[in-house]
Image (cartoon, rainbow, N blue to C red):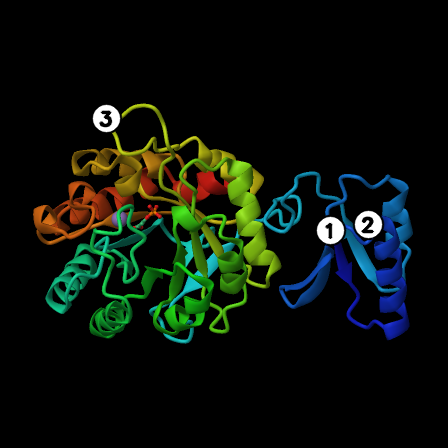
């Protein structure tokens, strides 16, 4: 249930509503109060409440509107917000801000190295990414590696290099944050916070990203074996904490076959458009683990209605310190950008995406 509070509300009315909700939930389940588009809302799980309860709540003086949402995720659902969201990234005041989602002219292309390795590597890749026509630069400064003996990223130095790359190219940057205590530091440097697959259910991290003082959007990657519902509930944590700007990223899930690194679940793209108003982008690099499959799966993702792609690019993929096998060259990126432009015109993707509604 999502309760919108009236703009003018007295403290008595608030107390009365709080008492009623306390009584209804037995004080056992949290009621979360947050701001959505500058309106105060209270959200609670209503799966165990009777139908009459809605009338009782809507009659409260503090209440403007009550929405019943059947799914366990509430604020990210289309039952709450019918129209699809658009998220503005980068310097909103300048003309360099990038739109992701419904209002975008075409799907967004995010590209860059898996990891920031050195100044020369990042700056040359950033320039190539810009020249290829991509709109956002990616690069990991803090790397969640499977083995403790693998390259772990340059840390703060990597963030500084990303800032330099942004100044050089004008491209907004996205980078991963792995721990709650680092959210504010990463948000100081990055235009989008990336929460990686391994942290999709790191709840303190989701909460901290939802509260970041820089109001940076968050790209939430699907967990290694996460169901769509678990993923949407993870997104719900960020939104409920106060940050409506969440982008979902499908990056493949665990499967039994070893020919590809993961199984890229493109069915989730149209499905998510039905379930949630949040933009959905696809990562064919981690989704396949193989550079030669990336162009085809990029096309497939766009055809499925993705709001964008995130691609790993390296000037010399075979010498990359991280994920070289799945990294494409700047030349390959250029042709993916071109194909995306053509496909979005041919398929009239914008229209199709609205039709999903
Ligand atoms: C990455 O984007 O480099 C990354 C580590 O991705 P994921 O969390 O999807 O594995
Ligand atoms: Mn990677």
Query: In the image, 265: left or right of 65?
Result: left
- The quadrant holding residue 327 is top left
Q: Which mark is residue 212?
A: none
Q: Which of the two labelled residues, at mark 3 and mark 2, occupies the earlier sequence position?
A: 2
User: How far across and down, in percent of the image, does residue 308 sit?
Assistant: 36, 47
Q: Which of the two labelled residues, at mark 1 and mark 3, occupies the earlier sequence position?
A: 1
Question: Which is more toward the observer, 28 or 299?
Answer: 28
Determine the residue positioned at 79% across, 66% down. 6
Q: Which residue is mark 3?
A: 259
- The quadrant holding residue 343 is top left
Q: Which mark is residue 25?
A: 2
Quadrant where the C terminus sits is: top right
Q: Which residue is mark 1?
A: 44
User: How far across and down, in percent of the image, does residue 187 sit?
Assistant: 41, 69
For mark 2, give the secondary structure. helix
Q: CA distance from mark 3 to mark 2?
A: 49 Å
Query: In the image, 305: left or right of 149?
Result: right
Question: Which is more toward the observer, 319 or 272?
Answer: 319
- Kindly tell me whether mark 2's CB lies below 8 Å from ligand 1: no
- Is there CB contact under 8 Å for labels 1 and 3? no
**Numbered marks: total:** 3
Query: In the image, 41: left or right of 73?
Result: right
Disc 1: CA contacts within 10 A as few (<14), some (14-19) or many (>=20): some
Vertical order, 99 against 335 (above or below): below
Disc 3: CA contacts within 10 A as few (<14), some (14-19) or many (>=20): few
Residue 84 seen in render = no
- Is there CB contact under 8 Å for labels 1 and 2? yes
User: How far across and down, in percent of the image, does residue 168 sit?
Assistant: 20, 73
Question: Which is more toward the observer, 278 or 326?
Answer: 326
User: How far across and down, in percent of the image, does residue 224 sit?
Assistant: 40, 39
């Amino acid at each position: 249930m999502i309760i919108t509070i009236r703009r003018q509300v007295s403290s008595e009315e608030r107390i009365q509503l709080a008492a009623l909700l306390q009584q209804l939930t037995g004080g056992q389940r949290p009621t979360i109060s947050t701001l959505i588009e500058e309106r105060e809302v209270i959200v609670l799980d209503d799966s165990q409440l009777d139908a009459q309860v809605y009338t009782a709540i809507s009659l409260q003086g503090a209440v403007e509107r009550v929405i019943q949402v059947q799914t366990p995720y509430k604020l990210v659902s289309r039952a709450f917000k019918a129209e699809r969201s658009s998220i503005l990234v980068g310097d909103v005041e300048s003309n360099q801000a990038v739109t992701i989602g419904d209002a975008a002219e075409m799907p967004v292309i995010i590209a860059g190295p898996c990891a920031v390795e050195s100044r020369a590597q990042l700056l040359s890749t950033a320039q190539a990414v810009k020249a290829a026509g991509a709109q956002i630069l990616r690069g990991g400064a803090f790397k969640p590696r499977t083995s403790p003996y693998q390259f772990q990223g340059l840390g703060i130095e990597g963030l500084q290099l990303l800032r330099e790359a942004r100044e050089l190219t004008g491209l907004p940057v996205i980078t991963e944050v792995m721990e709650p205590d680092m959210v504010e530091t990463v948000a100081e440097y990055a235009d989008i916070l990336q929460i990686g697959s391994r942290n999709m259910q790191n709840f303190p991290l989701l909460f901290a990203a939802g509260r970041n003082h820089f109001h940076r959007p968050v790209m939430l990657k699907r967990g290694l074996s996460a169901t769509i519902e678990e993923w949407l509930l993870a997104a719900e944590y960020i939104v409920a904490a106060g940050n409506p700007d969440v982008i979902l990223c499908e990056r493949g899930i665990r499967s039994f076959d070893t020919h590809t690194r993961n199984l890229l679940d493109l069915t989730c793209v149209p499905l998510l458009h039905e379930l949630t108003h949040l933009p959905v982008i696809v990562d064919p690099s981690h989704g396949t683990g193989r550079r030669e499959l990336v162009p085809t799966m990029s096309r497939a993702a766009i055809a499925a209605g993705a709001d964008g792609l995130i691609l790993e690019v390296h000037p010399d993929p075979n010498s990359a310190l991280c994920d070289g096998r799945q990294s494409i060259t700047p030349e390959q990126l250029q042709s993916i950008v071109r194909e995306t432009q053509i496909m979005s015109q041919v398929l009239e993707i914008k229209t199709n995406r609205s039709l999903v509604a």
